[in-house]
Image (tube, rainbow, N blue to C red):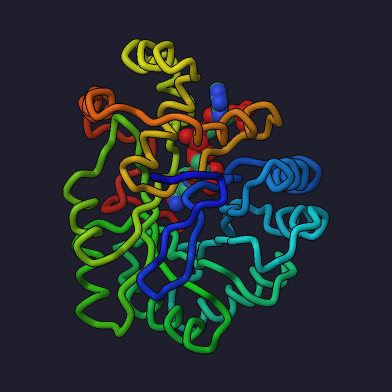
């Protein structure tokens, strides 16, 4: 059972990653992201998820610097954007990310999308392996990878990704992919865990929420943890940042877990990774 906001999962290389973090997609660079990051860290969050394409890495770095928590207690993730895939391009893009964040090492770096049309994710992964072996990143992973993309990497490279961050919520439970990841010790991480707000008035979730005296957002986030999926809800509102993290004082019953599992419709809010080739 995940006991607190600072509880961690151990990745296959031994690095400890918090089960819970803050997402900052669509959070404006500058004051908005600085305040969100600071509020979250002050509320006890230790993990922040950004990406080059969010164009707020500078603000994330500033929020971290102002939050007054030792760097080694934090777990910072960023992602390589599609247009920077390729060996040399990845090394250059990583330097740029680090300069913007103002950090001297990263905890987790992810290939943002496989972008199959480009055909470069294997070569890109080799650059990730170099950065990892050089000690510049504590853990490396992928995002939006389907089983066959993971298999390509595992067949052609040395290091199995430590994390796969994918769209995951009660309408998209990714059963087969989750089983594959468990089998290969790849930690699954949920993006858009709240389905970008679309599930918060679902009657099944409302009924469960009333029973535990929690909000529907808290029920979904607790369900993530009991499914052993790392979760990174986004909010720019201080009261929601705190509310979302207040999920460590209750446990969903097996029956309620099943009810939530039953909401799956294999429905995405985001793009299908096999078809997303924007760069
Ligand atoms: N790897 C990828 O391709 C990928 C794709 C998408 C997202 N992500 C990552 O995953 C993170 C989370 O996903 P997301 O931002 O798409 O969506 P999300 O976390 O599912 O939902 C965020 C939305 O829900 C609202 N919200 C948050 N907490 C709430 C609460 N307690 N009650 C009511 N509304 C609430 C937020 O509004 P307010 O801000 O106004 O509170 C925002 O509109 C992102 O920020 C990003 O870091 C990764």
Placement of 251 over or under 97, stated as above or below: above
**Left or right for 74, reference 182:** right
Instruction: Pick the residue in front: 273 or 207.
Output: 207
**Is residue 103 shown above or below 237?**
below
> Up-down: is 139 above or below 116?
below
Placement of the N terminus among the 4 image quadrants? top left
Looking at the image, which residue is at 48% across and 56% down?
Answer: 8
Q: Position of residue 130 (x, y in %)?
A: 46, 87
Task: Name which quarter of the figure residue 271 lies in.
Answer: top left
Q: Is residue 260 left or right of residue 79?
A: left
Left or right of 98 on screen, residue 213: left
Residue 156 position, x and y percent, is: 24, 82
Residue 40 placement (x, y as % from top left):
68, 43
Residue 36 occupies which quadrant of the picture?
A: top right
Above or below, 66 relative to 101: above
Residue in the image at 58% along x and 73% along y: 93
Residue 5, position in %: x, y? 56, 45
Any part of residue 28 in sight: no
> What's the residue at 43%, 65% (across, down)?
111
Residue in view at x 73 percent, y 41 percent: 39
């Amino acid at each position: 059972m995940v006991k607190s906001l600072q509880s961690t999962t151990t990745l296959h290389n031994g690095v400890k990653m918090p089960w819970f973090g803050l997402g900052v997609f669509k959070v404006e660079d500058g004051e908005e992201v600085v305040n969100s990051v600071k509020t979250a860290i002050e509320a006890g969050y230790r993990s922040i998820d950004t990406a080059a394409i969010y164009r707020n890495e500078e603000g994330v770095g500033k929020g971290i610097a102002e939050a007054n928590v030792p760097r080694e207690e934090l777990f910072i993730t960023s992602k390589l954007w599609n247009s920077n895939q390729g060996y040399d391009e990845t090394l250059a893009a990583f330097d740029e990310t680090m300069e913007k964040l103002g950090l001297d090492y990263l905890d987790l770096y992810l290939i943002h999308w496989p972008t199959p049309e480009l055909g470069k994710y294997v070569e890109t992964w080799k650059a990730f392996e170099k950065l990892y072996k050089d000690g510049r990143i504590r853990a490396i992973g992928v995002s939006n990878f389907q089983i066959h993309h993971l298999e390509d990497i595992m067949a052609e490279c040395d290091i199995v990704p430590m994390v796969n961050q994918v769209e995951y919520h009660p309408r998209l439970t990714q059963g087969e992919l989750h089983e594959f990841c468990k089998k290969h010790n790849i930690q699954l991480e949920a993006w858009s865990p709240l389905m970008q707000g679309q599930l918060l008035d679902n009657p099944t979730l409302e009924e469960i929420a009333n029973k535990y005296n929690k909000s529907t957002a808290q029920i979904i986030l607790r369900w993530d943890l009991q499914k052993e999926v790392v979760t990174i809800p986004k909010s720019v509102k201080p009261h929601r940042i705190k509310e979302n993290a207040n999920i460590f004082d209750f446990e969903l019953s097996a029956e309620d877990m099943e009810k939530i599992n039953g909401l799956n419709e294999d429905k995405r809010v985001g793009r299908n990774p096999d078809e997303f080739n924007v760069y």
